[in-house]
Image: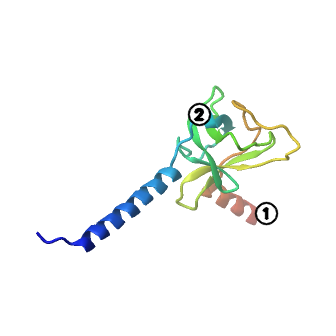
Amino acid sequence: MKNNYFETTLGLIILIFASYAMFIFIQANKTYNKKETIELSAKFLKSGGIFIGNDVKLRGIKIGTVSNVSLDEEYLAKIDMLIDKKINLPRNSEISVQSDGILGNKYISILPGDESQSYLVNQDSFLIVNDFESIEDQVSKIIFLATQ
């Protein structure tokens, strides 16, 4: 039997790159441990297609994930999120549903408020909520403004 060191070396290199790619994939899609997070919630009139597992981003950087989507007693969309404990969000922070493009995935976007305010703690709710605006909503606003 002929030993072919080139094929063995090439196979080892491919195995190393595949392992590295799997590691990056797992890191990008990791779920947050309950000990490392605080749970916050927000109530929306329109949640815009948010699902469990969608990202929560602060200025475009992932800081958490959506842990639950449900209806409350007033039929508002209640979205619970697990946010990294290291992130201190002021009480007057704004929260909204955003999209990664026309056909992109939805995510929760947080715009931090004035830092002179106290910070949100575990089981708190966001007070300033901007509802999701679909493309149809935006087009109808443009048409309404154009007809005035």
Q: Are marks 1 and 2 in contact (CB under 8 Å)?
A: no
70 lies above or below 46: above
- In this view of the protein, can residue 58 be seen by the observer? yes
> Which of the 4 quarters of the picture holds residue 68?
top right
Q: Residue at x 64, y 25 (%)?
A: 73
Question: Residue 3, image x and y in percent?
Answer: 18, 70
Q: How is the image coloured?
A: rainbow
1 lies above or below 85: below
Residue type pointed to by label 2: Lys
- In this view of the protein, can residue 79 be seen by the observer? no
Q: Residue at x 61, y 56 (%)?
A: 136
> Which of the 4 quarters of the picture holds residue 84?
top right
Residue on which disc 2 sits: 34
Dot 2 surroundings within 10 Å: few (below 14), some, or many (20 or more)?
few
Residue type pointed to by label 1: Gln
Q: Is residue 16 left or right of residue 62?
A: left
Task: Mark 1 or mark 2: name the one nearer the start of the chain.
Answer: 2
Q: Is residue 136 left or right of residue 124?
A: left
Q: Nearer the viewer, residue 123 or 100?
A: 123
Question: Residue 81, image x and y in percent?
Answer: 62, 38
71 lies above or below 111: above
Q: Nearer the viewer, residue 38 or 131?
A: 38
Indicate the secondary structure of the residue bearing disc 2. helix
Question: Residue 50, image x and y in percent?
Answer: 56, 45
Indicate the secondary structure of the residue bearing disc 1. loop
Question: Residue 75, image x and y in percent?
Answer: 62, 31
**Mark 1 and mark 2: span between their CA atoms?**
52 Å
